[in-house]
Amino acid sequence: MNAVEIKDLYKSYEDGKIKALNGINLTIRDGEFVSIIGPSGSGKSTLLNMLGALDVPDSGSISVAGRDLKSSKKLNEFRAESIGFIFQLHNLIPNISVVENIEIPMFTQKLSSKEMRSRALKLLDDVGLKDKADMLPNKLSGGERQRVAIARALANNPSIILADEPTGSLDSKTSSKILKQLIDLHEDKNVTLIIVTHDMDVAKLADRVIEVLDGEIISADEESLINSKIDV
Ligand SMILES: Nc1ncnc2c1ncn2[C@@H]1O[C@H](COP(=O)(O)OP(=O)(O)O)[C@@H](O)[C@H]1O
Ligand SMILES: [Mg+2]
């Protein structure tokens, strides 16, 4: 099965004046690690939002983990159970503790509060933050918060992780650490990893680099990347 199949996807804003996605066709295999690069405003986040069923296309089709997003009932549950999101602004809920933030996506599942807590603590342990479980997010550093966001993204063992500039606001040392954690996950659990980045050093770590410009994919494999004029 493919992790992602996108056919003839269009999305515009402002009554069609802004063509954010302009005929995207893309297949991503199960367990693949791809990066999406392109200048600001090229449609990367729009594409990722579509993949996460956070926004609705004007036309075209998207299936994620074998599921057609258009015809989906119970989309919220599907999203919570199959997709892990990591964004640059990690959107942790400020007035609940770190461990409670990680439990949020688990609410769609029928788990006891004890089960939720032990799973959340295990996830926190995996990102090296078990001792911060009871703290509020704003007591943590930027890198630590991003690790909490990773733990939260993994709460339901998603088959696919969507990361939009996950290291964008971090220093290079912290950002390597975060990336390593994501890549380990992809390697150990065969999670499909899709990372949007403007950092070519990050992009190059992927199995495949997809380059977006003006809402179109202008290259999508290693070979064409080598021949293209990407600013490294
Ligand atoms: N909610 C929105 N309303 C209006 N325009 C938007 C919206 N989201 C994105 N856009 C526009 O669509 C284009 C693509 O944006 P985006 O996908 O965020 O690009 P990127 O992530 O590559 O920087 C840009 O011109 C942006 O201004
Ligand atoms: Mg963006």
Image (spheres, grey):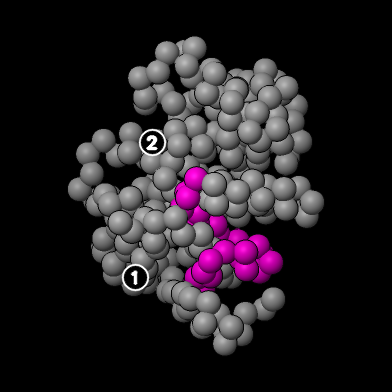
Which quarter shows the C terminus?
Answer: bottom right
Which label sits on residue 25? 1
- Give the spatial CA distance, label 1 vs label 2: 25 Å
Left or right: 134 in relation to 80: right
Question: Residue 1: image x %, image y %?
Answer: 30, 56
Q: Inspect the image, locate mark 1, and give the three-letter code of the amino acid beneath it.
A: Asn
Where residue 13 appears, as percent x and y from the top left, is 39, 61
Who's the residue at 33% across and 50% down the image?
65
Answer whether residue 192 is magenta in the image: yes
Which badge, 1 or 2, is on the more N-terminal residue?
1
Is residue 223 at all visible to an observer of this figure? yes
> Any atom of ligand 2 within 8 Å of the CB at mark 2?
no
The residue under label 2 is which amino acid type?
Answer: Glu
Side (left or right) of 161 relative to 87? left
- Whether 47 is among the magenta residues is no
The stretch in magenta equals 189-212
Q: In the rendered image, which quarter is residue 118 located in?
A: top right
- Tell me the crowding category of disc 2: few under 14, some 14 to 19, or many 20 or more residues within 10 angstroms, Cα based: many
Residue at x-position 76% and y-position 36%? 141
Above or below residue 213? Residue 62 is above
Q: Look at the numbered discs 1 and 2 and tell me whether their residues touch, using CB distance below 8 Å.
A: no
Q: Is residue 83 above or below residue 164?
A: above
* Residue, far bottom: 227
Q: Is residue 18 left or right of residue 195?
A: left
Residue located 65% across and 62% down the image: 202
Q: Dot 1: few (<14), some (14–19), or many (≥20) neighbours within 10 Å? A: some
20 in relation to 53, above or below: below
User: What numbered label is drawn on residue 75?
Assistant: none
Tell me if residue 94 can be seen: no
Dot 2 lies on which element? Answer: helix
116 or 9, nearer to the observer: 116
Q: What residue would you read off at disc 2? A: 81
